Amino acid sequence: MDQKRELSSIDLAALVTELNRYEGAKVDKAYLYDDDLLRLKLRDFDRGRVELMIEVGDIKRAHAADPDHVADAPGRPPNFAKMLRNRLSGADFAGVEQYEFDRILTFEFEREDQNTTLVAELFGQGNVAALDETGEVIGALSTVRLKSRTVAPGSQYEYPASRLNPLDVSRGAFDRHMRESDSDVVRTLATQLNLGGLYAEEVCTRAGVPKETPIEEATDDQLGALHDALARIDERLRSGDVDPRVYEEELSGDEADDRDPRVVDVTPFPLAEHEGLPSVGFDSFNAAVDEYFHRLGSEETDDGEAPADASASRPDFEEEIAKQERIIEQQKGAIEGFEEQAQAERERAELLYAHYDLVDEVISTVREARANEVPWDEIAETLDAGAERGIPAAEAVVDVNGGEGTVTVELEEEGDDGGTVTVELDASEGVEVNADRLYREAKRVEEKKAGAQEAIESTREELEAVKERKREWEEQQAADDGGDGDGGNGEDEEDDEEYETDWLSRSSIPIRSPDDWFERFRWFHTSTGYLVIGGRNADQNEELVKKYMNKHDRFFHTQAHGGPVTLLKASGPSESADPVDFSEETLREAAQFAVSYSSDWKDGRGAGDAYMVEPDQVSKTPESGEYIEKGSFVIRGDRTYFEDVACRIAVGVQCEPVTRAIGGPPSAIVDRAAAHITFEPGMYAQNDAAMMAYRNLKKRFNDQSFVRKVASADQLQEFLPPGGSDIVD
């Protein structure tokens, strides 16, 4: 069976109680591993060192870990970790809550000068957001900008749309949600009741209801048994009555001789669905979760060792493609479900108005009785008696729920072929308020549909990315196979191609860090080997012209305001230089560099114009009566123009002769980088684009730790222009 990689909503409900036992622990330091594993090191006065782990990547988890299960601290902390250290160091852990029935945990930290909230989103793409006391986002691992919600620095944090909690839903609401489905019992529990596949099957088993029972054939007694099974699970979670289990699966064949059983699931209590699997018990669910994910990581490390011939190991693209296609189908089904649910809510609201007098009579009767302090059970008996006498309003009532203060009525649909529809009414409100509630519910469901539509577009992009990686791999394999024969005069070309490919497949790449004087500026080397440097701000623009511009260099700037000073260097800062006849390709790359880091990119333009002059044409002396701003210069004499230069920047990982992140015009980067990604002006914020690039590049290398060290998201961001970006290839 597939191994569990994400904690469910039920798992999180069980974990929250145990994690709150660490209330009062003090935060020492925050660490960020890769781009998705957050570690908070705390000190508990009773328990000693506490390691809180929150992972939001392919694996999604949150728990306190055994210190022996925690990897050594990573190197230079990225910006997100630095921000957390500033805000959380010395803070007290004030508790954690699960947001409704969603896979979201909210951690609270208190300090005398400021309080901080960490929101861990353990669903979808995963995210961690840090909020101040007002709920404003200070920083997040990923920026989210959707029609339904925004998670971005400076904005108020927005939770996803609320989901139905199947553990505390009333019997009437449970029956209504189940009866609305046109599927079978287990699928309805999994999707409409938000239980997920495993726990939907577990509830069916505990209730003694066949999973494949069509909803229209399910009896009221069966629905009652399902609701009771859910209530028992809820009571067990609330009371902390857990009996945690880590489930294992024995390996078969030759693997079984040398390997321990592999872990497949961790649950807060034994599951009937796993009755045939061996399991290990634990004193706490947190300990079970920690052990499970520790063993899962160890197993994947063992399985992930590179084979002797790494190029012969074919990635399982088909499985990943099939997975993404399954997700798309599920998302399509969810969208259809949202559409049907929203339509059903609107139809219920309209039926209330169509049967206004009857519904008003029911509500008025109940409200009058309650005003006279008539007990709910007597109201139900009175309505039953009225139904036997043939009173239409009493006949319409099918359920009275005193605990919820609701009355459920059955109303006839209009038309010859219309059936009946049940509507749950708040007996304390009038017809209009009840109808408005249904309309608002329809609107809320439609907002969930919009979010699902955005999610499906994201999944389609991931699917296309997998297909593209498959095409690239197959093309590379075809090229390798074509070079196995007698190459004759093509040996040098084959060697070059194999050399490039080897960087990606090597299990370990030695790091050779450069220490170049120009790295604090924007920079790149042209395809012909010349250095181009640009200013990051007004101070650097001044410094480049005054200190580093030599007489044989070339000065570039854009026609648009807000571009960097760009120098095409004929030599290094301490070298003597001779006049250079730069090629047209070299000049155009320098112009593209100037355009791409200018306001042309920030304003979303796909191209811009730049000009070039000799150093002696650049002056800081303005015309009489004029003023020159800091970082700006006066240009005198003729200019050489480069028109309609494309805004394009590539970032990549260089492995030879030094190891580092590089970026610049694509034509200058492609041949130098072992792997690269090209950007154009677009919608993703600079830090998000850098994270996308990092994740993409890391997946291409067998030695992913190498990419983390030399080309982290922060390091790649140094080469991306300010403003929004999109990936071109």
Image: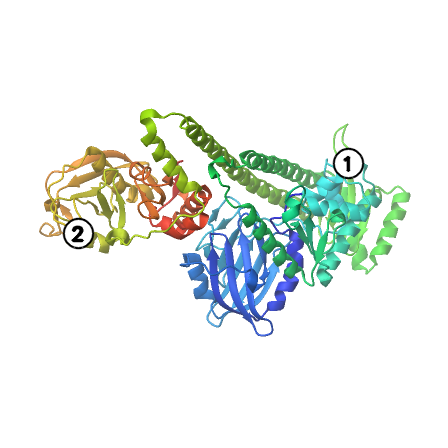
Disc on res. 214: 1
Residue drawn where x is 30% and y is 52% of the image: 514
Q: Nearer the viewer, residue 468 or 443?
A: 468
Label 1 sits on a secondary structure element that is loop
Could you tell me how far apart the alpha carbons at marks 1 and 2 are, in whole angstroms? 79 Å
Q: Amino acid at mark 2?
A: Pro
The tally of labels here is: 2
Q: Nearer the viewer, residue 71 or 509?
A: 509
Judged left or right of residue 264, residue 523 is: left
Depicted 375 relative to depicted 46: above or below: above
Disc number lying in front (1 or 2): 2
Describe residue 525's horizontal placement relative to residue 725 as left or right. left
Q: Position of residue 117 (x, y in %)?
A: 52, 61
Q: Which mark is residue 573?
A: 2
Q: Position of residue 289 (x, y in %)?
A: 63, 57
Residue 621, can we see it? yes
Does residue 536 show up? no
Disc 1 or 2, which lies upstream in sequence?
1
| Mark 2 surroundings: few (<14), some (14-19) or many (≥20) residues within 10 A | some
- Does 395 appear above or below 168? above
Mark 1 is on which residue type? Pro
The answer to which quarter of the image holds residue 239 is bottom right
